Image (cartoon, rainbow, N blue to C red):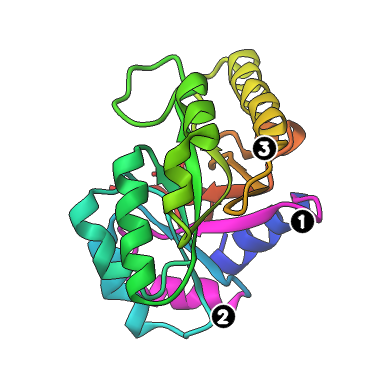
Amino acid sequence: MTIAANIQSIEDQLPAHTKLIAVTKTKPVALLQEAYDAGCRRFGENKVQEMTEKQPLLPADIEWHLIGHLQTNKVKYMASFVSLIHSVDSLKVLQEINKQAARHQRVIDCLLQIHIAQEETKFGFDETEAEALLNGPELDQLPNVRIVGLMGMATNTDDETQIRREFRSLKQLYDRLGNIQRPNVAFTELSMGMSSDYLIAIEEGSTMVRVGSAIFGTRN
Ligand SMILES: *Cc1c(COP(=O)(O)O)cnc(C)c1O
């Protein structure tokens, strides 16, 4: 299948409220251009350096999404153009995003990454930490960030019941925390689902699926 055909078949399965983020990490710009020509306007990269190298080589109307772990010292390189940061996993990085966004006189949209998988990973808030941040006083000092929702990755398993359970609990958290009323909190996006599990994620209420290999083929 071609990239265009892959994109089309995924798009055909998405409900109207769910957006496709084409995950382009490790792929050369020629393939990103191919996806662009097929209609894709939202690209996700997991490394800041790779994203900042590709961005000037491609059309300006692309939305760039950072989906991988973010180090504070890298925020400045993408602060002028990044569209949405899916992977905010600490107050410290959020403070740095705010600082760099202010330098560019803009507000950067962010998602809090929630640790929902059974696997041990270093990254992501647990539910209590996310709730504390969204209710805490620190956000008042961060007018140049807006938290627009949550992101999560399910366990890498063939057990669909487990994947569904994890997505469902993230959706419940999203619905609960989405009631919080603050100037820089406005939940509209729930980023969940990748190539292997996006159909389950859609059924559980995802508004953004991050799909790489199902569009571009496997990565080496
Ligand atoms: C690589 C990656 C994806 C896409 O994975 P595929 O299995 O290729 O669809 C989605 N989300 C994150 C955070 C990733 O790092």
Mark 2–mark 1 contact, CB under 8 Å? no
Task: Give the magenta-colored segment's residue range.
Answer: 14-38
Q: Helix or strand or loop: what does disc 2 sit on?
A: helix
In the image, what residue occupies the spot 29% across and 43% down?
A: 92
The image quadrant where one finds ligand 1 is: top left
Q: Which residue is mark 2?
A: 37
Q: Which residue is mark 3?
A: 180
Q: Which residue is mark 1?
A: 12
Image x and y of residue 119, in percent: 38, 17
Q: Earlier in the sequence, mark 3 or mark 2?
A: 2
Q: Amino acid at mark 1?
A: Asp
Classify residue 94 as left or right of residue 146.
left
Mark 1–mark 3 contact, CB under 8 Å? no
Q: Helix or strand or loop: what does disc 3 sit on?
A: loop
Q: Is residue 58 above or below residue 15?
A: below
Q: Nearer the viewer, residue 76 or 41?
A: 76
For the residues labelled 3 and 2, the Cα–Cα distance comes to 39 Å
